[in-house]
Image (cartoon, grey):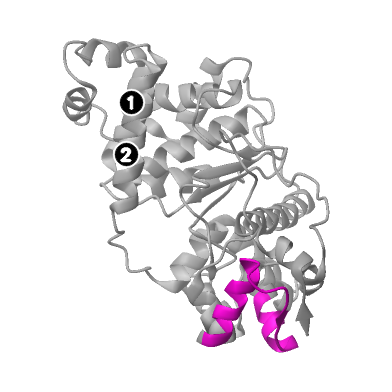
């Protein structure tokens, strides 16, 4: 099968690793493919089998390889990110999967007679939302929880309100569909029965993930859906940064501890013991929100933090596969799918699709991991 120069324009809009192309085509043919993408050659010929593998790797329908331009598509989720150039195919795939899980869980909750999310709660102001978030996650009890378990504690508490809280660095348990931390730290999808939060586990800091959780939860209580940036140009992001920051670092206490004669780095070093669940970037964000530093200072510090993060290798070796399946789906969603399947309301095949696992043996091991049987 032959691709022509117009098809190469479509393929240039997707990101991929050279090693992936070598695995698909072999070293020599992978070079021919790169020449084709770079428009050094006008055509590229490959077997149908290898082109199917290419389409799967790029996460697009096979027929898209032969288009002259990509079809127009509806916005899959509002994009709150600064200077965004659009969502990558992997992130789109991840969001689409989240929406499918959410739709299933919404129907499950309605069928089982659950109330709407936070029905009859007073959420008229951001102060009300801060109070509600602290109540939902049992914030006042977190000091009793050991380091490394606080995020799990918060997530477990939120799931009691029928929220889906996903945590993963890949889409649909596929290691070839990595979600870059630079592209997405998290997103929120509001629903009146089953709101959903996604946290990118590529963030190696527990405190960083806690801030993401609180930021996305603020979006949910504001009935927002979108991919977050944590910048300040949009009112939505400003408010959610402010809500998350107020929970972790109350303004009055924060301002009293900040020394205007010290540098931002010295202040953050001094404050990290006072606000133990706040990451350095969260502290800098709070300082900007309270006008203790200017925007340039904040941007310079943020840039240095991102550069430092990119050089930091995660110490995690991936963890237990079945624990990762549960975390990437959310524990309450996983339990609900399993319960419906064991009770005959859902097919095993559909359950495997919903949970992004490939075998019945894996399904049984997830059941055992959760202690359901």
Asked whether 250 falls inside the magenta stretch, the response is no
Q: What residue range appears in magenta?
A: 28-54
| Relative image position of residue 59 (x, y in whole percent) | 67, 67
Seen at 82% across and 66% down, the residue is 67
Majority secondary structure of the magenta segment? Answer: helix
- The residue wearing badge 2 is 305
Label 1 element class:
helix
Seen at 68% across and 45% down, the residue is 194
| Relative image position of residue 338 (x, y in whole percent) | 63, 69
- Distance from label 1 to label 2 (Cα)? 10 Å
- The residue wearing badge 1 is 284
| Relative image position of residue 221 (x, y in whole percent) | 61, 29
Q: In this view, does 48 lie above or below 152?
A: below
Q: In this view, does 198 lie to the left or right of 64?
A: left
| Relative image position of residue 120 (x, y in whole percent) | 68, 25
Lower position in the chain sequence, tag 1 or tag 2 = 1
Count of numbered circles in the view: 2
Can residue 370 be seen here? The reply is: yes
């Amino acid at each position: 099968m032959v691709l022509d120069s117009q098809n190469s324009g479509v393929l240039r809009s997707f990101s991929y690793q050279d090693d992936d192309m070598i695995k698909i085509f072999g070293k020599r043919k992978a070079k021919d493919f790169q020449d084709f993408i770079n428009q050094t050659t006008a055509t590229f010929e490959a077997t149908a089998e290898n082109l199917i593998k290419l389409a799967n790797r790029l996460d697009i329908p096979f027929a898209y390889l032969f288009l002259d331009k990509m079809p127009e598509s509806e916005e899959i989720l509002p994009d709150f990110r600064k200077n965004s150039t659009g969502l990558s195919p992997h992130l789109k795939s991840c969001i689409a999967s989240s929406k499918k899980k959410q739709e299933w869980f919404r129907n499950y909750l309605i069928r089982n007679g659950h109330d709407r999310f936070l029905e009859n709660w007073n959420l008229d102001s951001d102060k009300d939302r801060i109070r509600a978030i602290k109540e939902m996650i049992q914030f006042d009890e977190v000091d009793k929880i050991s380091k490394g378990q606080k995020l799990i504690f918060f997530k477990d508490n939120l799931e009691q309100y029928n929220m889906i809280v996903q945590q993963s660095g890949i889409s649909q348990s596929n290691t070839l569909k990595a979600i870059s931390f630079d592209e997405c730290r998290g997103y929120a999808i509001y629903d009146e029965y089953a709101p959903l939060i996604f946290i990118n586990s590529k963030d190696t800091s527990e405190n960083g993930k806690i801030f993401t959780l609180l930021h996305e939860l603020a979006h949910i209580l504001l009935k927002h859906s979108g991919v977050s940036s944590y910048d300040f140009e949009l009112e939505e992001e400003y408010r959610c940064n402010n809500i998350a920051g107020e929970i972790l670092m109350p303004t009055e206490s924060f301002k009293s501890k900040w020394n205007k004669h010290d540098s931002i780095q010295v202040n953050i070093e001094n404050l990290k013991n006072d606000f133990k669940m706040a990451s350095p970037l969260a502290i800098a964000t709070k300082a900007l929100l309270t006008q203790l530093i200017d925007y340039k200072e904040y941007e310079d510090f943020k840039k240095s933090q991102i550069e430092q993060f990119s050089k930091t290798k995660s110490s995690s070796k991936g963890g237990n596969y079945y624990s990762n399946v549960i975390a990437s789906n959310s524990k309450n969603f996983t339990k609900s799918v399993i319960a419906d399947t064991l009770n005959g309301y859902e097919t095993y095949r559909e359950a495997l699709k919903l949970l992004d696992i490939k075998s019945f043996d894996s399904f049984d091991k997830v059941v055992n991991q959760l202690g359901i049987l």
